[in-house]
Image (cartoon, grey):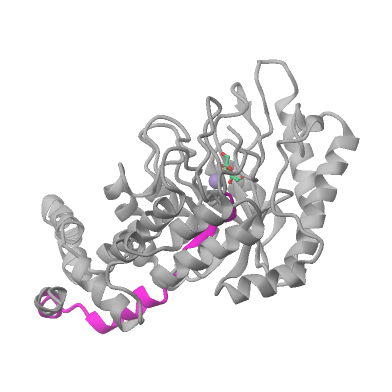
Amino acid sequence: MTFHEDYRRLAERLNNEGIDVDAVKTKLKNQHIETPSWGYGNSGTRFKVFSWRGAARNIHEKLADAGYIHRLTGVAPSVAIHIPWDKTDDYNALSDYAAEQGVSIGAVNPNLFQEDQYKLGSMCHPSGSVREEAIAHMVECCEIMEKTGSKALSLWFADGTNYAGQDSISERKHRMEAALSEVYKHLPAGAKMLIEYKFFEPAFYHTDLADWGMSYAMALKLGEQAQVLVDTGHHAQGTNIAHIVAFLLDEGRLGGFHFNARKYADDDLIVGTNNPMELFEIYHELVSAGERARDVDYMIDQSHNIEPKLEAMLVSVLNCQTAYAKALVVNRPLLIKRQQDGDVLGAHRVLVDAFETDVRPLLMQVREEMGRQPDPIAAYRSDSYVQRVAEERGVADSGSGGYPG
Ligand code: PSV
Ligand code: MN
């Protein structure tokens, strides 16, 4: 195949730069991107959900699809679940079914935004009884973690207010602290609580955890198991996410990512499409942090509407793989030297050189060594899986568990 010669030339170039290509390949083989169950069902915007023929209708079909993505890529071995969308009576059976599909259950995401009682919030709701219900739901999710072997409780709150004076911001903060510390006691041993933030939507005057600093403050109060989750779509325009990542890594509090791409708001587009340089910068900070990035969870959080579900997920995983590969081929000794010399553009050039490196032959080689198809998109496009599930499943109504829009 043609890529072998390209790979040989690239490996030679990298070796000449002092980069250990075998070590790079080992890291790429150990990469782990978690896909979300809600990315496999019908989902969309608040204007319209375009139903997709063959979209998964239940958690079993979602796990089967995730297993397919893992078979194609070799780097997506776990699936985040959302409760109650993915609720089932028998979580042991669900874990077994996931294992049969070649995947495991990853982060458990409680849903604290779709019930009527959460109109004014969940953890920060003015009513103590609503807060109790929210806490009980999260404790139930901790129990599901025990049963499924999940190691992450991933929390995002739609809590906030729409108008100045609607509620006391500081009181709501106290309610959040109290509720989180209650839930923290129920975390399974060795598990993480991931605290996500978002500066707007669905609340528009203030959200109770608006940025990384607020999540970080909560995590510090709770304890070591509490960590910040960075969703790349949850920042104001122009925010330097790589800086946030570097800071949290240095503090030992970066728990994980929700990857997606955005242009205007929380657009949930395919990660690395309109922001490849930003994704590379993030991975560069992760690679630079070395061992300090060891326990970070990498998850996709996207909700596709007009894109074919499986191809969108596949491209998402591959884009993360590409960004990681580019970050791994940064000539670090040269970068450090130029930084110390105060060589502004020379240092920048080292990053640009890595970003502009065509890592496709390297990734093809890695996939071949992993026993996968070198080009997963070509493999997917010539495969019958999509056609088969379209025939078997037909068109589900939009209530198949996912963002209804
Ligand atoms: C909503 O903005 C959101 O995308 C959050 O990021 C959550 O992580 C996700 O949905 C799942 O509830
Ligand atoms: Mn998210």
Secondary structure, magenta segment, majority class? helix
Residue 97 coordinates in the image, percent (x, y): 66, 71
Residue at the (36%, 62%) spot, across then down: 380
Residue at the (82%, 47%) spot, across then down: 135
Taking the view exactly as shown, the residue that stands out farthest to the right is 129
Decide which of 78, 287 is in the foreground and name it.
78
Residue 98 coordinates in the image, percent (x, y): 62, 70
The vertical placement of 270 against 152, above or below, is above
Decide which of 399, 250 is in the foreground and name it.
399
Left or right: where does residue 342 sit relative to residue 399? left
- Is residue 252 visible to us here? no
Q: Which residues are magenta?
A: 10-38
Please tell me in which quadrant of the rendered image residue 36 appears. Answer: bottom right
Left or right: where does residue 223 sit relative to residue 27? right
Where does the C terminus fall, quadrant-wise? Answer: top right
Please tell me in which quadrant of the rendered image residue 322 appears. Answer: bottom left
Q: Is residue 109 magenta?
A: no
The vertical placement of 227 against 239, above or below, is below
